């Protein structure tokens, strides 16, 4: 077995998108007990990759420093007997703690799923991080109940596109979402995604729109990726006993002059959450739940939105589009 492979690396270890390059002398991983070696066909780009590239996202202990947490490909070898029914040559996709921007990855078989016949490897690479994160937020953290209202910020992101569909399937009465262009708003309210009300945050005040549509009651759940700049306004949009989960900090971590009065007055519960910091046991339970969704992808009840499929030689362009929030849905790179 060759000891080296190609993988995307960063000049100097951390840097900007221009510092990304394909390193032809990267160490090829060796699968350990309970792991499979995957020859990667495609990987998804996530906003956390931008933060990690810049040195702002701590890599979990023991994880590869190579970027990337989701992938699709085929099994080349195993590190032991715990194969979970998989065989060499099986086409799979899954989630990892790092290392997906590469030709090969060694990953626990507990985090692998079989590729459905109706989905391409590109589509499969776009599923794990977004759909597991959305599932975690909606069901594990928020404990969503049917008949309730929910607001998904960053509505055209991969996570929110998944979350809107999951909310619809879970029986949400009204699904609000925010986005920065009319095209993105139209996508979120399209029949295949299913948001009820899309709010262009550049031209409308989402608090006013929500209060108007709920007759002043506010929403029951909020999923936020923006952070500080939205903290106060989320409290204003929240209804009584609202639960808010913060999944990102796109706008920063500071909320100067925040008025916490609504937290007590409305009995608001606020929680932060990340998926990558969770242990394998926790993540594997999400993988089990995601597997139950796969028939819905095949029937078209759930859909994966690919903004663009690029060659991994175009990784700098992929990062640029994520940085500029140009994407509606996921950006996937093909390893060619």
Image: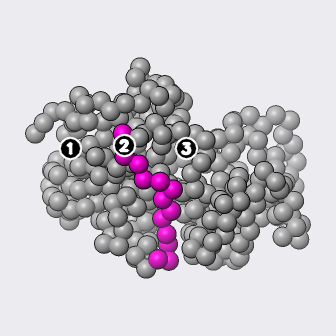
Is residue 319 at least partly visible in the picture?
yes
Outermost residue to the bottom = 299
List the residue tagged with mark 2: 312
Residue at figure coordinates x 78%, y 37% from the top left: 255
Task: Provide the secondary structure element on which disc 1 rests.
Answer: loop
Residue drawn at x 58%, y 39% as measured from the top left: 323
Q: x, y percentage for residue 336?
A: 28, 46
Which residue in the protein does label 1 denote?
A: 31
Relative image position of residue 291 (x, y in whole percent) = 39, 68
- For discs 1 and 2, the disc positioned in front in the rendered view: 2
**Residue 171 x %, y %:** 63, 77
* Circles 1 and 3 in contact, beta carbons < 8 Å: no
Residue 322 badge = 3
Q: Is residue 295 above or below residue 142?
A: below
Q: Measure how far apart labels 1 and 2 are at the Cα level.
A: 24 Å
The secondary structure type at the circle numbered 3 is helix
Within-10-Å neighbours for mark 3: few <14, some 14–19, many 20+: some
Q: Farthest left residue?
A: 1
Rendered position, 289 above or below 102: below
- Residue for point 40% across, 23% down: 11
Near-viewer residue (175 or 260): 175
Per the model, the C-alpha gap separating discs 1 and 3 is 31 Å
- The part of the image, by quadrant, that contains residue 183 is bottom right
What is the spatial separation of the Cα atoms under label 2 and label 3, in whole angstroms? 15 Å
Lower sequence index among marks 2 and 3: 2
Which percent across, then down, holds residue 194?
63, 72
**Occupied quadrant, residue 158:** bottom right
N-terminal of the pair, mark 1 or mark 3, is: 1
Q: Which residues are magenta?
A: 300-313
């Amino acid at each position: 077995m060759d000891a080296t492979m190609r993988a995307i690396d960063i000049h100097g270890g951390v840097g900007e998108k221009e510092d990304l390059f394909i390193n032809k002398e990267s160490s090829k991983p060796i699968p350990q007990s309970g792991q499979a070696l995957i020859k990667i066909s495609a990987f998804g780009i996530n906003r956390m990759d931008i933060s990690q590239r810049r040195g702002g996202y701590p890599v979990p202990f023991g994880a590869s420093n190579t970027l990337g947490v989701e992938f699709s490909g085929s099994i080349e070898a195993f590190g032991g007997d715990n194969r979970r029914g998989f065989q060499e040559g099986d086409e799979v996709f899954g989630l990892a703690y790092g290392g997906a921007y590469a030709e090969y990855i060694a990953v626990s078989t507990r985090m692998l799923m079989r590729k459905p016949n109706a989905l391409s490897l590109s589509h499969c690479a776009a599923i794990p991080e977004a759909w597991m994160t959305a599932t975690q937020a909606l069901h594990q953290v928020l404990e969503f109940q049917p008949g309730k209202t929910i607001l998904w910020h960053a509505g055209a992101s991969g996570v929110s596109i998944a979350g809107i569909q999951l909310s619809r399937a879970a029986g949400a009465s009204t699904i609000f979402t925010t986005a920065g262009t009319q095209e993105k708003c139209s996508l979120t309210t399209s029949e295949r995604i299913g948001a009820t009300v899309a709010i262009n945050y550049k031209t409308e005040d989402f608090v006013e729109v929500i209060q108007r549509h709920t007759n002043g009651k506010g929403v029951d759940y909020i999923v936020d990726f923006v952070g500080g700049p939205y903290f106060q306004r989320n409290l204003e949009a929240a209804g009584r006993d609202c639960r808010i989960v913060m999944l990102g900090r796109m706008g920063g971590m500071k909320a100067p002059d925040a008025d916490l009065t609504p937290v007590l007055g409305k009995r608001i519960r606020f929680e932060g959450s990340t998926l990558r910091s969770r242990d394998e046991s926790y993540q594997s339970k999400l993988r089990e739940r995601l597997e139950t969704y796969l028939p819905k992808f095949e029937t078209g009840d759930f859909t994966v939105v690919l903004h663009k499929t690029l060659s991994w030689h175009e990784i700098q362009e992929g990062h640029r589009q994520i940085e500029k929030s140009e994407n509606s849905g996921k950006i996937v790179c093909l390893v060619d």
